[in-house]
Amino acid sequence: MAVLQVTGSSISVRSSLPSFEGLRSSSSSNVKFASSNSGLSNKRSFRGLVVKAATVVAPKYTTVKPLGDRVLIKIKAAEEKSLGGILLPSTAQSKPQSGEVVAIGEGKTLGKTKVDSSVKTGTQVVYSKYAGTELEFNGTGHLLLKEDDIVGILETDDVKDLKPLNDRVLIKVVEAEEKTAGGLLLTEASKDKPSIGTVIAVGPGTLDEEGKKKPLSITTGNTVLYSKYAGNDFKGSDGADYIALRASDVMAVLS
């Protein structure tokens, strides 16, 4: 800290700041002092010392090691533009539900069987909308969640190519009816959310207490009735709606 001393007509500036190589005073800030007892009309000028640099502190934690069946995912950046190319404000950007696996735990144990993770580092995955704990690591958003919260593996940009994991199924939603039974045209707000669709892909099934796979009773091509508000909704590149949900949320097979 600089200390200013005024004694009679003399002015001195005593600085208690430590000396740093490369520290320069700012040319934009000038501090001027004038002696009240001197008859000189000229004013002495002193340059003010402005410290603008800040010390960069290294992060306290530099690694994240997931435990058990937990997985660390690097979140994919939110879309900044709409499909029509319109720039979206941050409040209108959809929250991403996909990312890259960057670290995995040692897996879980069922009975006496050790079950390894079904995903590997570098895999592109889709996860449940409200799952996990968000954290910022290496300047990027990450999500720490359980493997069971991963919906499926998606190596392309098209949700039709999603490979469901565990007991998840991918369904192509039947379009909502645009007219009532009496022929009246329905507005978008009044259309019932459809809960019928065609199964596009199914997961390998769940694990029993011995760590063995139990295949699902649902197969691709089935037309099914599912719970109205279950699962994760997606829009495909073909403009159709898709939903990924657990097999337990499928209520019936229609024929």
Image (spheres, rainbow, N blue to C red):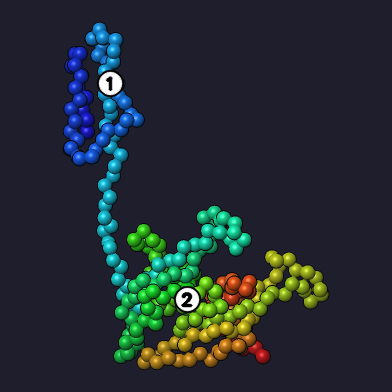
Instruction: Tell me where residue 121 appears, x and y as whole percent.
Output: 36, 75
The quarter in which the C terminus is drawn is: bottom right
Report which residue position mark 1 lands on: 45
Relative to 216, is 196 on the left or the right? right
| In the depicted structure, whether residue 254 falls above or below residue 23 | below
Secondary structure, mark 2, is: loop
Residue 183 or residue 221, whichever sits in front: 221
Which picture quadrant has residue 113? bottom left
Type of residue at label 1? Ser
Type of residue at label 2? Glu
- Can residue 129 be spotted in the picture? yes
Q: How many marks?
A: 2
Write the residue at 31% across / 26% down: 30
Which picture quadrant has residue 201? bottom right
| In the depicted structure, whether residue 228 falls above or below residue 224 | above
Residue 189 or residue 173, whichever sits in front: 173
Q: Which mark is residue 21?
A: none
Write the residue at 20% across / 13% down: 9
Assess disc 1: are there few (<14), some (14-19) or many (≥20) residues with their C-alpha within 10 Å of its C-alpha: few
Write the residue at 48% across / 91% down: 215
Instruction: Tell me where residue 191 appears, x and y as whole percent.
Output: 70, 70
Instruction: Tell me where residue 85 appears, x and y as whole percent.
Output: 59, 59
Write the residue at 28% across / 21% down: 45
Instruction: Tell me where residue 222 appears, x and y as whole percent.
Output: 61, 88
| In the depicted structure, whether residue 133 falls above or below residue 3 | below
Q: In the rendered structure, are the residues bearing label 2 and label 1 in contact, judged by CB atoms less than 8 Å apart?
A: no
